[in-house]
Amino acid sequence: MVNNAATVGRSGVHDYVLVRASAIILALYTFYLTGFFVTTSDVTFEIWQAFFGNFATKVFTILALISLLVHAWIGVWQVLSDYIKPALLRGGLQFIFSVLLLVYLAAGLLTVWGV
């Protein structure tokens, strides 16, 4: 077994499962939102706020947000690993993307639980 410091304990199978699971969650969330728009004839602010005020919608939205961030992180990591060869530049870009994804997570949590 060859250890690679860039993988941080992850394996290709682990990434494969995470990407597929996150894609399924995102697809289900898309169907959930589509169902809301199909069944709601007039979307007003009050209806939209009530929809996102529902506990199940909040939990599903957070799950979808986390799935999106996991999906994005693995994709960015793979692209940077494949195309950015200088280790310092790749590490710097990975750090920037990691911080950006954490900011997105914080903003998403504040937005969803602030409703």
Image: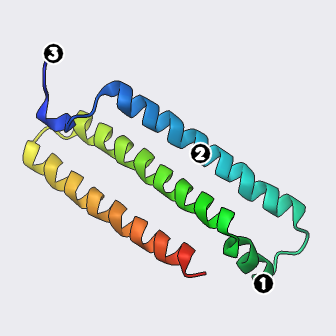
| Label whose residue precedes the other's in the sequence (3 or 1) | 3
Residue 26 drawn at (x, y percent)? 59, 48
| Label whose residue precedes the other's in the sequence (1 or 2) | 2
Q: Amino acid at mark 2?
A: Ile
Residue 89 drawn at (x, y percent)? 13, 50
Task: Say if 57 sits above or below 26 in the image.
Answer: below
User: Separation of disc 3 and disc 1 at Cα?
Assistant: 57 Å
Residue 52 drawn at (x, y percent)? 68, 72
- Binning the other alpha carbons within 10 Å of mark 1 as few (below 14), some (14 to 19) or many (20 upward) gives few
Give the quarter of the image for residue 77: top left
Q: Amino acid at mark 1?
A: Glu
User: Separation of disc 2 and disc 3 at Cα?
Assistant: 33 Å
Q: Secondary structure at mark 3?
A: loop
- Quarter holding the C terminus is bottom right
- Quarter holding the N terminus is top left
Residue 6 drawn at (x, y percent)? 16, 37
- Residue drawn at x 37%, y 25% is 13
User: Separation of disc 1 and disc 2 at Cα?
Assistant: 27 Å
Extreme residue toward the bottom, this view: 46
- Residue nearest the viewer, comparing 14 with 84: 14
Task: Say if 37 sits above or below 72 in the image.
Answer: below
Q: Which residue is mark 3?
A: 1
Residue 64 as seen in the image, left or right of residue 103: right
Q: Secondary structure at mark 1?
A: helix
| Label whose residue precedes the other's in the sequence (2 or 3) | 3
Q: Which residue is mark 1?
A: 46
- Residue drawn at x 78%, y 84% is 46
Q: Which residue is mark 2?
A: 25
Task: Say if 20 sits above or below 38 in the image.
Answer: above
